[in-house]
């Protein structure tokens, strides 16, 4: 049977065909193909892995091969000379086939998966979040974009990223396999990276976004906690650092009104925490650490020193402390703001 016959057969049955290259495969086209299967246009499409230009021309959409980027023609390759497409929105990494497909189809894919209207504001937020956290690294690795200056010598290697794990599905150099076997391995790799993509989407939609909503509410209500606006109170614990810094920038909160303390119930114990906001999301330096004389002091001794009943501890670095009650951490925050 010739290589053209399967394509003709699929077309006779009314199915569309996704084309990509055969041989050794990479994470970008493995993900691109998986994502396309979650669009309305290509959800029932067949797949043809080949480098034969005539067969690729017969496909409805082609990714990672063909030397052409043309949305109207549904051709999404990134290897050709002069290709410089980026995602935009502040991202500057050159796109791979995964990034190209995600740029053009990502919002629809997210909308379909979450069953939300395409114009729901959550779609845009998640679309940008998934690019930053998942797709961009795949684009960079495939295009050979270094994560940091090459004059820095890493102390160890990371070969467990998703691009590396996809690569491990390829047959070994000295392993004798036919094209059907390689195609089957490609499908396993595509399922791996695609499954991880949707796992992350579910997390960001069902956990990350609700936490963002809590931080927005806390920011809006912070002056009811303290007129200075320097203390945020959460009635339940949620990851807040990343959201706080992004929202502060978006709301253009003046430096003298930015929160320095965050209060929340401990997620594992029946008490409350007061945490100093760091100067940056990954920093160990605080905007205003808890008072120096409280640091490293615990329980009754700390309560006597501070004049606040129910104190549990203040960390030696002053970045976090605890009290048995919400009223207790509120008093600790009020005192700390003036010290």
Image: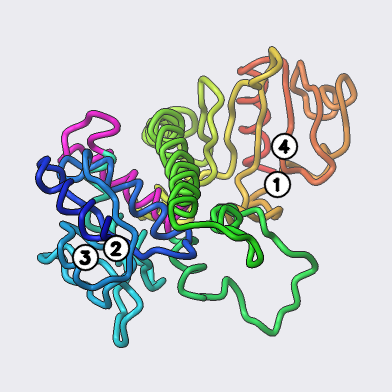
Assess disc 2: are there few (<14), some (14-19) or many (≥20) residues with their C-alpha within 10 Å of its C-alpha: many
Q: Nearer the viewer, residue 285 or 101?
A: 101
Q: Which residue is mark 1?
A: 289
| Label ID, residue 55 | 3
Q: What colour scheme governs how the chains and residues are painted in the rendered image of this protein?
A: rainbow
Determine whether 270 is above or below 298 in the image.
Answer: above
Residue visible at 31% across and 79% down in the picture:
84
Of tags 3 and 4, the one toward the viewer is 3
In terms of secondary structure, where does tag 4 sit? strand
Label 3 to label 2: alpha-carbon separation: 13 Å
Quarter assignment of residue 295: top right
Residue 103 lies left or right of residue 149; in this view the side is left
Q: Main secondary structure of the magenta part?
A: helix
Q: Which residues are magenta?
A: 111-135
Label 4 to label 1: alpha-carbon separation: 8 Å
Residue visible at 39% across and 63% down in the picture:
22
Q: Nearer the viewer, residue 115 or 327?
A: 115
Label 1 to label 3: alpha-carbon separation: 65 Å
Residue visible at 51% across and 20% down in the picture:
235
Q: Earlier in the sequence, mark 3 or mark 2?
A: 3
In terms of secondary structure, where does tag 2 sit? strand
Quick one: quadrant of the C terminus? top right
Residue 71 lies left or right of residue 285; in this view the side is left
Determine whether 64 is above or below 303 in the image.
Answer: below
Q: Which residue is mark 4?
A: 320
Q: Earlier in the sequence, mark 2 or mark 1?
A: 2
Q: Which residue is mark 2?
A: 63
Residue visible at 20% across and 55% down in the picture:
5
> Is residue 319 rendered magenta in the image?
no
Evaluate if marks 2 and 1 touch, with contact meaning CB atoms under 8 Å apart: no
């Amino acid at each position: 049977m010739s290589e053209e016959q399967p394509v003709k057969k699929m077309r006779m049955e009314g199915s569309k065909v996704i084309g990509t290259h055969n041989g050794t495969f990479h994470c970008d086209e493995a993900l691109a193909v998986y994502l396309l299967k979650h669009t309305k246009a290509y959800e029932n499409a067949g797949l043809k892995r080949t480098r034969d230009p005539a067969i690729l021309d017969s496909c409805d959409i082609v990714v990672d091969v063909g030397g052409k980027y043309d949305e109207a023609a549904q051709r999404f390759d990134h290897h050709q000379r002069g290709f410089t497409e980026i995602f935009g929105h502040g991202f500057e990494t050159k796109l791979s086939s995964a990034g190209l497909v995600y740029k053009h189809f990502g919002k629809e894919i997210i909308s379909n998966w979450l069953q939300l209207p395409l114009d729901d504001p959550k779609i845009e937020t998640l679309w940008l979040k998934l690019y930053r956290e998942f797709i961009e690294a795949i684009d960079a690795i495939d295009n050979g974009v270094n994560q940091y200056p090459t004059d820095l010598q890493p102390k160890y290697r990371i070969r467990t990223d998703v691009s590396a794990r996809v690569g491990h599905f390829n047959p070994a150099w000295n392993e004798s396999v036919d094209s059907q076997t390689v195609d089957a391995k490609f499908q396993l790799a595509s399922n791996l990276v695609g499954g991880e993509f949707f796992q992350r989407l579910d997390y960001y939609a069902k956990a990350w976004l609700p936490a963002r909503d809590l931080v927005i509410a806390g920011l809006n209500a912070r002056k009811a906690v303290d007129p200075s606006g320097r203390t945020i109170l959460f009635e339940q614990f949620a990851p807040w650092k990343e959201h706080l810094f992004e929202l502060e920038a978006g709301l253009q909160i003046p430096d003298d009104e930015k929160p320095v303390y965050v209060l929340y119930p401990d997620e594992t114990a029946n008490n409350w925490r007061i945490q100093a906001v760091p100067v940056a999301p990954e920093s160990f330096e605080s905007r205003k650490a808890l008072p120096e004389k409280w640091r490293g002091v615990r329980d009754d001794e700390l309560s006597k020193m501070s004049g606040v009943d129910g104190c549990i501890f203040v960390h030696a670095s002053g970045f976090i402390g605890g009290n048995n009650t919400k009223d207790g951490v509120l008093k600790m925050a009020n005192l700390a703001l003036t010290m």
